[in-house]
Amino acid sequence: MQFFFEVLIGGLLAGVMYSLVALGFVLIYKASGVFNFAQGAMVFLAALTFVGLQEKFGLPLWGAFPLTLGVMVLLGIGIERVVLRPLVNQPQITLFMATIGLAFFLEGVAQLVWGTEVRRLDLGLQDEPIESVMERFNLLISKFDLVAALVAGLLVAVLAVFFNKTRIGRALRAVADDHQAALAVGIPLKQIWAIVWSVAGFVALVAGLLWGARNGVQFALTFVALKALPVLILGGFESVLGAIVGGLIIGASEKLAEVYLPSLMSDFLLKHYDISINLAGIEGWFAYMLALVFLLVRPEGLFGERHIDRV
Amino acid sequence: MAWKKTVAAAVAAIACIAGSPGAIAQQAGTQFIGITGYRVGPYGANGAAFFGGFVDYLQLINQRDGGINGIKLSGEECETEYNNAKGVECYERLKTKSATGPTAIHPMSTGITYAIIDKAPTDKIPLITFGYGRTDATDGRVFPWVFPIMSNYWDAATGIVKFIATKEGGDANLKGKKIVLLYHDSAYGKEPHAVLEAEAKKLGFELKMIPVPHPGNEQQSQWLQIRQYKPDWVINWGWGVMSATALQTAQKVGFPREKMVGNWWAGSEVDTEAAGPAANGYYAASLNLGGKGYPVVQDIEKIVYGKAKVGSNPKLIGTVLWNRGVAAAMFTVEAVRKAQEKYGKKPVTGEQVRWGLENLNIDAGRLKAMGFNTMLPPIKVSCQDHGGSGQVRFQQWVGNEWKSASDWMKGDSALVRKMIEDSAARYAAEKNIKPECMGG
């Protein structure tokens, strides 16, 4: 039982790391109704810029953070000017395609400016077990994962206040519903988009720092975005809370599935059909399969808004 | 001479053009070398080091020696991003670029090797798979166009088992021990399965194989299983981000890094520097030693970077993968040199280079004369043995560099040879190939 809880807790904490990336997607989706394919590239760019600035100018963490945030804000404003503004009132698929182009552009630019070498990112926090928990309960809980969970919780709280209690937050929701109608009632669409892309840049920076500190800053950071997809399908594309809950479900279920399902299925096949096969490695697709099943039952996700179109 | 890069990403193109004064893609009378490389994408950091060393060595041959017996080298690099489809596209593009073909192709990917292995005999282009690719291709009677030069994956796997046995006090002490193979869930990661299963049966250790899905940046469940299983050793068959993540997660679950041994694609600075202190004590097999203490490396630094200023990236000089790239380029150059001995001092074709590769004999004296000294073991290729060495060496990460942890050693050569011949024979039967030496 102790092992089960270890896998479960580890999975929940891993899920929080997925949620951090998923939050960036939610922000953009809430503001424009567009799935931002470039979110993974933004995570990579933010982390690479952070370590690049540290390396080039010998900056401490607190020095590199605001500078990188500045870069991400400028990027957000630039994306609004160059990519989004010309596409106002275009179909959402057009905006989506634009973000695909943006993803490749950002990946290329990041490597052009800072190089392709793998870099270590030291946040002063080792990925080690909490000794007191280990000694008392023989349970492995990582200090690093726990801090990441706290950061994610804080981000959710801040974003929830931002969306629900501020004028900009309410305007964001109006823009997501209908660009033209939002413009008609005087909502400054351009500013709203610039702000939301900048906030998404901030979220990408936080996610990039945590993932980068864990695995090193390298191109593979762009792949963490793929883990956010099932999280979004489960939690709902428009819900900040959904990103967290979806992350927890995906993280826990994929870890439990990877640890327990292959041996159960292998034993079953051997016992009933005399087939010996190693089914380990289902973690790579299990989350997507779960999301697919969920999509069939509840297409809008756990916390997503149900869309009803009048015909 | 310079290198015209046809790369998919702007970054590599610009970086390359910047480092290519007086760009000459190819000239009549030069030996054209096609390179299917990768410097961007998920494995870009590994590729940049390997192909940086590769191109730097070719530059050295031109700048220092004026080419091979007066025949200058020219070339073109095509970006594959470690993607099989792009690898095939690059291969198709490069094979028509020169009257003599691309000399020899280093796919630098087991997946790409598998994708083009059946094309090579038709196109008469030798494939050099230095430490990767299809292991049974070591039998040149069935795979005359493929050269898994020096050592193959099965040499690595049995070498690792032998290294572990040495640490445990002998083969007999492996009985009852538990060893985990943590592998990249790809063709590359599955290559050592059969030989490790045979070793487990022979030596009596318990083997558990745990896959890590691509790219390997999340390994919580794999390492919790390892923690529960309590193995004596973990073999890390990783690539790219997977290795750094494995080291970090091993630290998280409290598994000692001194009980982890990587293969030679999981044992470079790219893997350990990203993991920081979590990598300390980690062992890895190696095809070559890193470091700048070799005359050939010093020549490149002095001539290619210093005098001619056409080097790839000074930060990479002497790293394990950069040195490996230098060694890989040397094999191509020496094969051309050998072919020129027989076919004359002129640009040679793929067919002639194939003969050169099959008759390659780089002994300790030749290694010293070329400035490689102990970076590599002596290599003698033959029709039966397209590897030519089978040796492997171990190194340990000590916080800021790799330190040698063994001498050159062989794994279970008899077992490996038998398995190679059995597997090659099955392939020959399947493809209706009559095993025989091709000759010149």
Image (cartoon, rainbow, N blue to C red):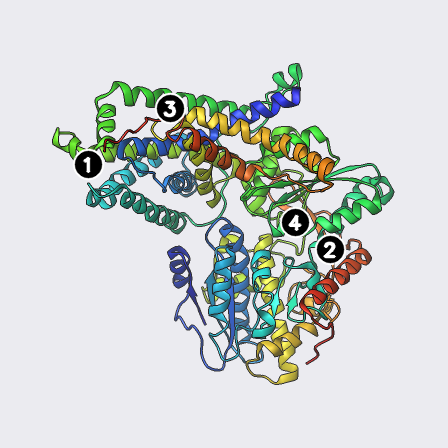
Q: Which mark is residue B190?
A: 4
Alpha carbon of mark 2 to alpha carbon of mark 4: how far? 14 Å
Residue toward you, A109 or A35: A35
Mark 1 lies on residue: A190
Q: Is residue A89 left or right of residue B193?
A: left
Proximity of marks 1 and 3: CB atoms separated by less than 8 Å: no
Q: Write down the chain letter for disc 3.
A: A
Alpha carbon of mark 2 to alpha carbon of mark 3: how far? 54 Å
Disc 4, SS: helix
Q: Is residue B162 left or right of residue B306?
A: right
**Identity, as a three-letter code, of the amino acid under mark 3:** Phe
Residue A37, picture quadrant: top left
Q: Write down the chain letter for disc 1.
A: A
Residue B124 in percent (x, y) is at 59, 75
Label 4 packing within 10 angstroms: few (<14), some (14-19), many (20+) = some
Disc 2, SS: helix
Q: Is residue B393 above or below residue B179?
A: below
Q: Is residue B408 left or right of residue B4?
A: right
Residue toward you, A51 or A242: A242
Q: Write down the chain letter for disc 2.
A: B
- Do dots 2 and 4 share one subunit? yes
Alpha carbon of mark 4 to alpha carbon of mark 3: how far? 41 Å
